Amino acid sequence: MLKMNKEELDLILKGGEGLKLEFKENFNKETIETLVAFSNAHGGKIILGVSDKKEIKGVSLGKESLNNWANEVKNKTEPFITPNFEIFEINGKMIVIIETIEFPLKPVSIKGVTFIRKNNFNIILSPKEISEIYLKTKNSSWDFYTKEGVLLEDLDEVKISRARNLIEKNLGVNLINNNLFLKKYDLITDKGVSNGAYLLFSKKQLRETDIQIGLFNDPTLIKKSKLIRADLFSEVEEVIDFIEAYILKEYIITGKPQREERWQYPLEAIREFVINSIIHKDYRDGLHTQIKIYPDKIEIFNIGKLPYDVELKNVIAGKEKSHPRNKLIAEIFRDAGLIERYGSGISRALKEFKEYGLITPEIRERSGGFEVIVQDIKLSEKLSGLVNVPDNVPDNVPDKRRVEIITLIQNNNKITISEISSQLKLNEKTIKRDIDILKQEGKIKRIGPQTGGRGYWEILEQK
């Protein structure tokens, strides 16, 4: 038995449950589920004898308790895991720390059910996600596998040459000929043509690569639409061409011989979002990518969640290495110079929007897919007619306005929307919209009635 003082345990408990830590009062089925979830993620510890409220309850231990628990874990997991058990005494109470490492050959399951750790929860993986975790363990992905019924002659030599030439120019190499290029990148093998090669170079139009792109006045009124069914390289250019045709462009007189062009949005950042929607799409689902262009915003949606072990906030911050769903396709785009090697494209695109004077694009997971919304907020407010926006107002005015709203609430937590509207000299509809956004972002909360002066605002602590 090991000794642990109260201060050492308090330090552990202070952090609370999370990605690698969970509290349990007793050993039970949920304990094994958590060990499985830890094994499929980054490993972790379970502290037995501690409640969810961080109260030290202690556990009752018999002579064979640890051996019985270890055998139960082994018998109920596949492949079986062997966690480490350590007993500690705190103020006369026994607690047990059970620790497991990330398992090298995933997925691990309990009675045929596979869990993975997300934040401080255990999530059940779907069959598709189980397939992805297995392929990732094997350092592979769906696009490496053979496409049944497709032959080498079904691939377009011109498209193959175009990709090979881009890679040769970008990397400064000589890939000799198309056939050697395809073999070098495992686009074709002795078993046949890969799914990746089929999507990249097929002679015929493919339903799997469907992109529906349209010009909208509002969510229900479409002015122009186009269905793109092409190889993945061509799709990038067709989408960008369509976007350029329907977003604003102004010419700036600088005194130089030629005028400077300024697009409504930074085009390189838009290209990054488009390419990401193409190389990270789940092509097994058969659902099309959607791109909607409005006068004041662009919405890009592709089917396919983020990988099971990737956090969206880390992707946005550029802290997450690239985890492409389609590794082979991503490798071709990378070596052709169209995407970044280490997954910094998203954070770089967001930085470009900031430098462009536009608000940060909204990036979220939705309906089993990934969505990016870029917006020209100044134009949005001009079109809405809610406020008169002078031409010289900075484009990040909504962010500044919401800070002012929070400041007013800090000074008077019973302030009404009408009073905020009056003090900021803005339409109440605009204030209500900002209040809803602040609520959604978890920055403020309304306690009690919305009207009548009987409720109040609470500013939530931001972690």
Image (cartoon, rainbow, N blue to C red):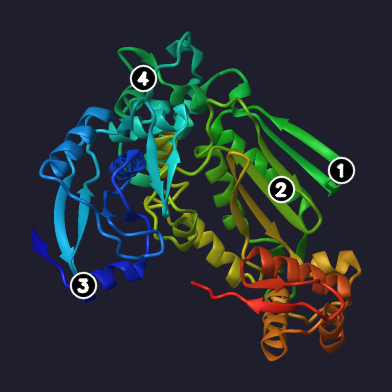
Closer to the eye: label 1 or 4: 1
Labelled pair 4, 3 in contact (Cβ < 8 Å):
no
Q: Amino acid at mark 2?
A: Ile
Mark 1 or 3, which is nearer the eye?
Answer: 3
Estimate the x, y position of residue 432 in percent, counting from the top left. Answer: 81, 70
Q: What's the amino acid at mark 1?
A: Thr
SS at mark 4?
Answer: strand
Q: Residue furthest right?
A: 385
Please indicate whether residue 121 sits to the left or right of residue 355 in the image: left
* Of residues 206 and 335, the one drawn nearer to the viewer in this rendering: 206
Please rate how many residues cluster around mark 2, counting C-alpha atoms within 10 Å: few if below 14, some from 14 to 19, many from 20.
many
Q: Residue at x 36, y 19 (%)?
A: 188
Examine the rendering and report whether any part of residue 251 can be seen. Answer: no
Q: Which mark is residue 188?
A: 4
Kindly identify which residue carries mark 1: 220
- Residue 8 is labelled as 3
Which residue carries the number 2 mark? 243
Q: Mark number for residue 200?
A: none
- Up/down of 123 relative to 328, above or below: below
**Between discs 1 and 2, the one toward the N terminus:** 1
Residue 5 at x, y = what percent? Answer: 17, 73
The Cα atoms of the two marked residues, 4 and 3, are separated by 57 Å
Q: Is residue 431 visible?
A: yes
